[in-house]
């Protein structure tokens, strides 16, 4: 029987790549995002793929992760259309990056970041989970980040939300250990998405306000190096969904990123942080 998967933040980047990968792998996918027009455009992409017969397994739905009062109705809508009769998988991908040094961002900026990246994820998961428990099967895949393992300067708000995602995912994984519901974290490094483009107006504003980090913003946030293609992350998500024994965590990134994660774990904090600080401050 075909399995039904929900993907939030499905209109671009990792979400879009994952929609295409899962549909082409035989899953029914409900793609959720605010931009319905972009979700619909994915249908055209599927129709031109090599597996045209899979196109009807993609259902786009307008969705706002910050409006939990609407979660119940959208889940009921999904259940009425699910070919598998229930929800097998949930990929929590919706999120964004709030750029800025801690002294430059407002508390409201931080609250907004948490509402989308953490509280929305948590509340939506709690709404979907009962249907997985009812059938004693399922997969919950939370898209965290390498920034959830290593807190990075200039995106501290984003790192804070991803650390929270890590904590809640670990707790949920243990709580569901005696069920057939697997909980997985995917930690991408730098990925080629439109996040940098979205953040640019905010960076412009930080510089206009004469932040003492203005030159550092120009150097590091205006010139973000090209990341891995979103398809690399989609491959890890597919494995997390399809494998009988998925890993608890998939780190997706360059060799440099993987080394950085290992260094954070084994190198003394004073040495690790001093090296990062020297790079940022050019000491």
Image: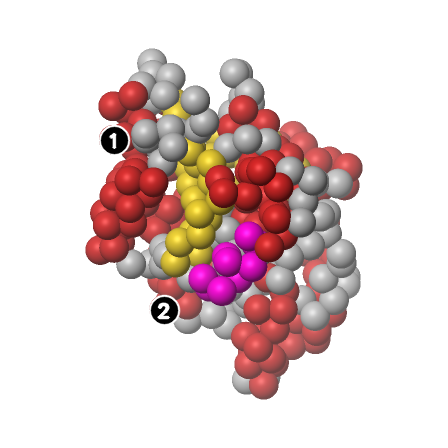
Of 158 and 156, nearer the camera is 158
Q: Quadrant of the N terminus?
A: top left
Dot 2: few (<14), some (14–19), or many (≥20) neighbours within 10 Å? Answer: few
Residue in the foreground of this view, choosing between 134 and 170: 134
Answer few, some or many: residues within 10 Å of disc 1's Cα (few below 14, many 20 plus, some between 14 and 19): few
Tell which circle, 1 or 2, labels the residue nearer the N-terminal end: 2
For the point 72% across and 62% down, which residue is it? Answer: 224
Label the magenta part by its dominant secondary structure: helix
In the rendered image, residue 40 lying in the magenta stretch gets the answer: yes
Which quadrant of the rendered structure holds the C terminus?
bottom right
Residue under label 1, please give it.
130
Asked where in the image residue 226 lies, by quadrant, the reply is: bottom right
Q: Position of residue 217 (x, y in %)?
A: 66, 71
Q: Which mark is residue 108?
A: 2
Q: Quadrant of residue 252?
A: top right
Relative to 234, is 138 above or below? above
Q: Given this view, does label 1 or label 2 mark the residue nearer the observer?
A: 1
Q: Position of residue 129 (x, y in %)?
A: 30, 33
């Amino acid at each position: 029987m075909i399995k039904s998967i929900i993907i939030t933040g499905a209109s671009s980047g990792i979400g879009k790549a994952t929609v295409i990968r899962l549909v082409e792998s035989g899953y029914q996918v409900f793609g959720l995002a605010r931009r319905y027009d972009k979700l619909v455009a994915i249908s055209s992409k599927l129709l031109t793929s090599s597996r045209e017969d899979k196109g009807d397994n993609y259902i786009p739905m307008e969705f706002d992760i910050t409006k939990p009062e609407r979660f119940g109705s959208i889940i009921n809508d999904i259940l009425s259309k699910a070919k598998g009769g229930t929800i097998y998988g949930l990929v929590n991908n919706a999120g964004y990056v709030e750029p800025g040094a801690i002294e430059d961002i407002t508390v409201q900026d931080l609250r907004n970041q948490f509402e989308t990246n953490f509280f929305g994820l948590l509340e939506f998961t709690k709404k979907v989970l009962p249907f997985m428990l009812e059938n004693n099967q399922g997969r919950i895949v939370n898209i965290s980040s390498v920034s959830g393992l290593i807190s990075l300067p200039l995106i501290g708000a984003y790192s804070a939300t991803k650390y929270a995602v890590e904590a809640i995912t670990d707790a949920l994984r243990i709580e569901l250990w005696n069920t057939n519901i697997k909980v997985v974290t995917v930690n991408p490094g730098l990925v080629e998405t439109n996040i940098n483009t979205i953040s640019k107006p905010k960076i412009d504003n930080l510089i206009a306000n004469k932040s003492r980090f203005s030159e550092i913003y120009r150097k590091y946030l205006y010139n973000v190096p090209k990341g891995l293609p979103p398809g690399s992350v989609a491959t890890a998500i597919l494995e997390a969904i399809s494998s009988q024994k998925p890993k608890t965590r998939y780190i997706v990134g360059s060799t440099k990123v993987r080394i950085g994660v290992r260094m954070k774990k084994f190198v003394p904090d004073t040495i690790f942080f001093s090296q990062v600080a020297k790079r940022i401050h050019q000491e």
